[in-house]
Image: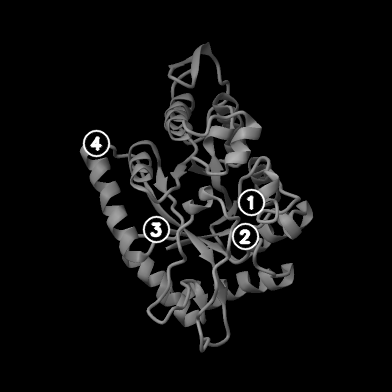
Amino acid sequence: MRFGVVIPSYGSYGDPELVVRLVRTAARLGYEGAWFADHVVVPDYAISWMPAPQLEPLTTCLVAIGATERIRVGIDVLVAPYRNPVLLAKMAATADRFGPGRLVLGIGVGYLRGEFAALGVPYDTRGAMTDEYLEFWRHAWTAPDPIAFAGRFVEVEGVHLAVKPTEGGVPLWVGGNIDRALQRAALLGDGWHPLWPEPGRYASARARIVELRDAAGVTRPFTFSFSCPAGRVLDAPQADWAVPEPVPPARPEYGYSPAVPRAADGRPRFTGTAAQLVDDVGLYAAAGVDHLTLRFWTSTVDLPPAALEEQLERFAADVIPYCS
C-alpha cells in the first residue's frame, strides 16, 4: 500500500507558506504524495462550504515540486471541463519536466453548477468533454509534433506542443463512483481514484474495471487508488460512534458525495485508534486498493495546523509501519 495525503489549500489553510510547510512535513515523514483540491471560482451559495482564500491546484503542484525533492504531487481532483485542454496539456507537460514523474492528475467531471456557469462551460456535456479531453491529452503527450486531433470539443491541426512529459504522459487517475466513471477510468485513464466506496463496492468495481480493460485490450499500467474521507488517529476508541456527517448546501448537485463508510459498530472508516486504522487499511488492501489518499482536514473540521501536523506524524509512525 502506498500513502498520499491531501494538503488543505483553502480557508484557514489557504496560506502559501503554510501549504509549503505541510508539503515538506509530508515529504519528511515519508508520504508518497501531496494532493490538492480544485476549484476555480465558487458561487456564493457554496462559499461557506469551501471558504476563501483558495489556491489554484496546478500552480500549487508546481510550487510543491520546487519546494521538495522526492514527493509526488497530485490534484484530488482536477475538473477537466474547466480547463482549455490544449493549455492544460502544455502546463502539465511543463510541470512534469520540472519534476519528472512527480505529477499525477486526478480527473473528475465536476458537479458545482454555479462554477460551470461562471466559467461559461456547459454542464450537461461535462462527461463527454472529459472523455474527449482525456483522449486528447494522451495523444498530445505521446504523438510526435506537429499534432493533429479532430473531435467534438477539441480540434487542432499541425501544431507543436513543443514540450512532452518525460515518461510519455502524466498519469490520469479518473475519479467518480458511478458505472460511467468506471468505464472512463478503465478505457481512458491510468488509474481509478473514487470517493470512499465501501470495501465490497470497491472490490466489485475493481473487478469491473479489470474486465473492461481486458475486453478492450488495454495493457498500460494502472493504479487502483482511493480518496479517503476525513479521518483522525485517536488515543482510544470512542464509546459512541454516532458522528454526524457534514451537511452540504441543500442543492441536488451535492448528491455526488457518498456516505462515509463505517465499521459494524458505526465507527467511520479511517477514524479510530492506530490499530483500528491498520485494520481499515488492511480491509481496503484486500479489496484491491494500491494507493490511499488520506484526508485529515476539511472545511468542516476545526483542526489547527499544529494538530494536523501531529496527525500526519502519528499516522506515519503508528499506522504505516504496520500495514503490509
Q: Secondary structure at mark 2?
A: helix
Residue 206 vertical position relative to residue 235 in the rendered view, above or below: above
User: In the rendered image, which quarter contains the C terminus?
Assistant: bottom left
Instruction: Report how far apart the C-alphas of labels 3 and 1 lie in the structure.
Output: 23 Å
State the residue in front, 100 or 302: 302
Residue highlighted by disc 1: 69
Marks 3, 1: nearer the viewer: 3
Identity, as a three-letter code, of the amino acid under mark 2? Ala
Tell me where residue 91 sits by quadrant: top right
Q: Earlier in the sequence, mark 2 or mark 3?
A: 2
Identity, as a three-letter code, of the amino acid under mark 4? Gly
Query: Image point 44% across, 22% down: which residue?
Result: 143
Q: Are marks 2 and 3 in contact (CB under 8 Å)?
A: no
Judged left or right of residue 43, residue 17 is right
Q: Secondary structure at mark 4?
A: loop
Colour scheme employed for the rendering of this structure: one colour
Q: Is residue 89 visible?
A: yes
Q: Residues within 10 Å of mark 3 (few under 14, many from 20)?
A: some
Marks 2, 1: nearer the viewer: 2
Q: Earlier in the sequence, mark 3 or mark 1?
A: 1
Q: Where residue 294 appears, x then y in whole percent?
A: 53, 63
Q: Are marks 2 and 1 in contact (CB under 8 Å)?
A: yes
Identity, as a three-letter code, of the amino acid under mark 3? Asp
Marker disc for residue 217: 4
Instruction: Report how far apart the C-alphas of labels 1 and 4 lie in the structure.
Output: 36 Å
User: In the rendered image, which quarter contains the N terminus?
Assistant: bottom left
Residue highlighted by disc 2: 27
Residue highlighted by disc 3: 290
Q: Residues within 10 Å of mark 1 (few under 14, many from 20)?
A: few
Query: Image point 40% across, 46% down: which residue?
Result: 191
